[in-house]
Image (tube, grey):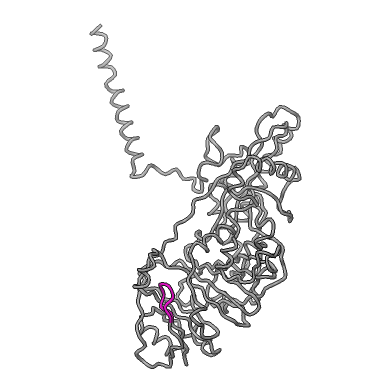
């Protein structure tokens, strides 16, 4: 809800405290469904996942705009993108966009950890602290070229363009073997299992949007990474082809989808669409390991749901002239120019509703060939309910604890922490027996009394390892030898000392 600029404003902070403390008095808990004001301390963005792709999808009627980015790393000669499309795209339907668009959408919609301080039972109010997480560098190397069509394999070049740093072909094909052979002969690295994936698209009359890097054009752009590609098409099918990506995968992949519509949230129609578990209070030591916490929680929920569901992580109205666009904000909401760059062409800044509005949905798919045999099919809905994957830590009150209310408050903390640990175990599968010290003291296991709670790493491994290089046993051995030598030589040393006197 609060931008980072507002957080620095003392008047704004004082205004928020008037609303935050009453909300805390009401006891925000796991079952809450209303919006609330808070401050984030960590977020779990798309950079958390190793094998991932990101896509922005804008849908309005039959018009679909898809902006594609991935985490490709390696020689640009190895880069190739093959995307089924419903018709031959015109050159004006293809463009490249700034990579920062994905960074901003991700930062805005990432799952978040928020913190509160308990109101002091004897009347002393603590300040609220805010920390930020550093952004991740997403630079991607580049290089490649395109060879000409040399062999007639039932493949036809319907159109050819150079857009930005990319050479683009629109192909049609008669059968998958011919298309696969043509792609390999022309320098595209296609997996062996591509035949079975390509044929259904050929049977349905789809074309193929084929991309490689133009080295000369890439050098002229001055960019040190491959920019995302955006395509616009008119089709009655609101879908995203994922089967080609699985043909080259050895396991599961993560896909983050940012979808924007006029009407409301976007959902899948051929797979179950679920919301991530949210609004749970967890131990305060999760603050220093929120990335791991969310990764393990997502993996657990993904497995519990049969590994074949699509999870919504965020949904919110981002209409430029509309009010609050996040609660709490972990990044700036999408600006007017960002929405236009993503393909939103219906906004009217002179209209208080922005021209029927813009609704933003973030979905997370972890897919493999066995559990996701079909491409993702979507539908726009009229559901404009705000939702966010966010998790809560509550810091104990400080200050004067001499009043009767304080004694009652302190006696209830162990039970509260016990519930937080049970929640942690249920969400992530972590062994909460390792954290029993937290229940009584509120401190991370292994942290000595007096150290600042929440600032040291969680002890996931309780085994006491020697220092690196095996130095521990060496020092113990030397100390033992020195002590033995002193004991053996003590009588002689004592005699010399007496005779010297």
Q: How many marks?
A: 0
Furthest residue in direction top, as rendered: 501
Furthest residue in direction front, as rendered: 350
* Residue at the spot 61% in from the left edge and 65% down from the top edge: 362
Q: Nearer the viewer, residue 396 or 385?
A: 385
Main SS, magenta residues: strand
Q: Residue 6: x percent and y percent?
A: 61, 47
Q: Residue 327: x percent and y percent?
A: 66, 53
Image quarter for residue 128?
top right
Q: Residue 126: x percent and y percent?
A: 65, 36
* 489 lies above or below 201: above
* 381 lies above or below 407: below
* Residue at the spot 73% in from the left edge and 45% down from the top edge: 23
- The magenta stretch is 161-168
| 379 left or right, relative to 221 | right
Quadrant location of the C terminus?
top left
| 202 left or right, relative to 407 | left
Image quarter for residue 417?
top right
* Residue at the spot 50% in from the left edge and 77% down from the top edge: 94
Q: Nearer the viewer, residue 78 or 291?
A: 78
């Amino acid at each position: 809800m609060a931008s980072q600029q507002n957080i620095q404003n003392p008047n704004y902070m004082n205004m928020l405290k008037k609303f935050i403390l009453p909300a805390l008095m009401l006891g925000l808990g796991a079952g809450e469904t209303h919006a609330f004001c808070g401050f984030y301390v960590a977020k779990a963005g798309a950079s958390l996942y190793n094998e991932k792709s990101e896509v922005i999808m804008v849908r309005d009627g039959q018009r679909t705009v898809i902006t594609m980015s991935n985490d490709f790393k390696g020689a640009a000669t190895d880069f190739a993108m093959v995307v089924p499309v419903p018709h031959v795209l015109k050159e004006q339907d293809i463009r490249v966009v700034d990579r920062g668009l994905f960074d901003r959408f991700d930062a805005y919609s990432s799952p978040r950890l928020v913190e509160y301080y308990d109101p002091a039972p004897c009347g002393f109010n603590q300040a609220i602290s805010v920390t930020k997480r550093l952004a991740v560098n997403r630079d991607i190397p580049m290089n490649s070229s395109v060879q000409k069509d040399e062999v007639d394999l039932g493949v036809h070049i319907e159109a050819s363009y150079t857009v930005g740093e990319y050479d683009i072909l629109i192909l049609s094909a008669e059968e998958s073997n011919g298309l696969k052979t043509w792609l390999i002969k022309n320098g595209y690295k296609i997996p062996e299992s591509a035949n079975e994936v390509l044929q259904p698209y050929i049977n349905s009359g789809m074309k193929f949007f084929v991309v490689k890097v133009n080295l000369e054009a890439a050098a002229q752009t001055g960019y040190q990474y491959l920019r995302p590609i955006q395509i616009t098409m008119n089709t009655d099918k609101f879908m995203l082809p994922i089967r080609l990506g699985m043909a080259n995968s050895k396991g599961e992949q993560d896909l983050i989808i940012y979808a924007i519509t006029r009407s409301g949230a976007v959902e899948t129609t051929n797979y179950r669409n679920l919301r991530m578990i949210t609004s749970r209070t967890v131990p305060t030591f999760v603050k220093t390991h929120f990335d791991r916490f969310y990764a393990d929680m997502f993996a657990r929920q993904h497995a519990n749901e049969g590994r074949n569901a699509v999870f919504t992580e965020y949904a919110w109205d981002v209409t430029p002239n509309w009010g609050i666009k996040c609660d709490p904000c972990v990044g700036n909401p999408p600006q007017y120019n960002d929405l236009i760059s993503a393909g939103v062409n219906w906004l009217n800044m002179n209209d208080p509703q922005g021209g029927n509005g813009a609704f933003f949905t973030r979905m997370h798919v972890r897919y493999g060939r066995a559990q996701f045999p079909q491409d993702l099919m979507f539908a726009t809905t009229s559901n404009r309910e705000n939702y966010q994957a966010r998790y809560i830590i509550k810091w104990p009150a400080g200050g004067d604890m001499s009043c009767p209310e304080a004694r009652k408050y302190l006696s209830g903390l162990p039970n509260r922490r016990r519930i937080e640990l049970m929640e942690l175990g249920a969400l992530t599968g972590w062994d909460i027996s390792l954290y029993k010290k937290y229940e009584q003291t509120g401190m991370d296991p292994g942290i000595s009394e007096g150290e600042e709670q929440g600032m040291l790493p969680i002890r996931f491994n309780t085994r006491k390892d020697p220092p690196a290089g095996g130095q521990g046993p060496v020092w113990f051995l030397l100390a033992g030898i020195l002590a033995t030598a002193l004991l053996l030589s003590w009588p002689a040393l004592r005699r010399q000392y007496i005779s010297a006197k």
